[in-house]
Image (tube, rainbow, N blue to C red):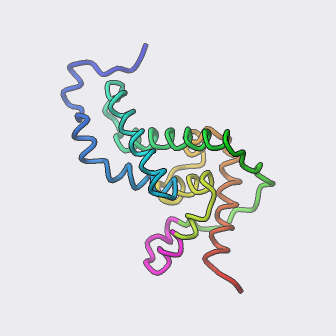
């Protein structure tokens, strides 16, 4: 049995056009932060709205941004998997210690915002996605693991490595 909205309930749900008009900016910005470049963000963005159109009938009406974030993350993960099949990524090494503080808070500081953006762009796609989902979107480790379809330990490891790389780049040469 699928979770399809009944005709009675569908009267209260937004239409595709309403979703697109209200959420297109959010989806594109999320895709851009995850991918790190406009060309890949465009691909993710287009695929997200193709899926929204295709699966709008399965939307239950609760948490539109959550639904869109899940679709965007799924499309992004599919894109990563496709690229990994083409060029395999290095295996994740040993787990590194966690550093206190989340980089998402740094985005609020305008002086560091540009440096942080450059530093985020230098991360690998999987680490950047985990950082965006944790630091900017505020998801838990378990939610990130579910979205990226990886174990929680891998999420912790990637976030730890990403934090170290970000701090190294933000501190600059000593």
Q: How many marks?
A: 0
* Residue 49 in the figure: left or right of residue 35: left
Q: Position of residue 151 (x, y in %)?
A: 68, 41
Q: Position of residue 117 (x, y in %)?
A: 51, 68
Question: Residue visible at 18% across and 27% down?
Answer: 11
Q: Which residues are magenta?
A: 104-117
Question: Residue visible at 64% across and 65% down?
Answer: 163
Check residue 111 for magenta coloring: yes
Question: Residue visible at 79% across and 54% down?
Answer: 93
Q: Between residues 102 and 47, which one lies in front from this camera angle? A: 47
- The secondary structure that dominates the magenta segment is helix
Q: Position of residue 60 (x, y in %)?
A: 34, 29
Is 19 above or below relative to 168? above
Question: Residue visible at 35% across and 52% down?
Answer: 26
* Residue 34 in the figure: left or right of residue 53: right
Q: Residue furthest right?
A: 94
* Residue 112 in the figure: left or right of residue 26: right
Is 6 above or below relative to 15? above
* Residue 84 in the figure: left or right of residue 50: right
**Quarter holding the N terminus?**
top left
Check residue 35 for magenta coloring: no
């Amino acid at each position: 049995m699928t979770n399809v909205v009944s005709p009675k309930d569908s009267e209260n749900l937004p239409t595709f056009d309403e979703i697109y008009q209200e959420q297109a900016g959010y989806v594109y910005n999320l895709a851009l932060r995850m991918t790190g470049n406009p060309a890949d963000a465009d691909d993710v963005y287009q695929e997200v709205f193709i899926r929204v159109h295709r699966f709008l009938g399965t939307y239950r009406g609760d948490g539109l941004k959550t639904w869109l974030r899940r679709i965007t993350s799924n499309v992004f993960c599919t894109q990563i998997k496709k690229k990994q099949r083409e060029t395999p990524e290095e295996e994740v090494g040993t787990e590194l210690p966690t550093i206190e503080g989340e980089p998402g808070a740094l985005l609020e500081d305008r002086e560091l915002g540009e440096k942080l953006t450059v530093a985020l762009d230098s991360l690998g796609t999987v680490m950047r996605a985990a950082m965006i989902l944790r630091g900017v979107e505020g998801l838990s480790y378990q939610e990130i693991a579910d979205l990226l379809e990886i174990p929680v330990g891998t999420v912790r490891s990637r976030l730890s490595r990403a934090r170290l790389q970000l701090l190294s780049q933000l501190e600059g040469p000593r």
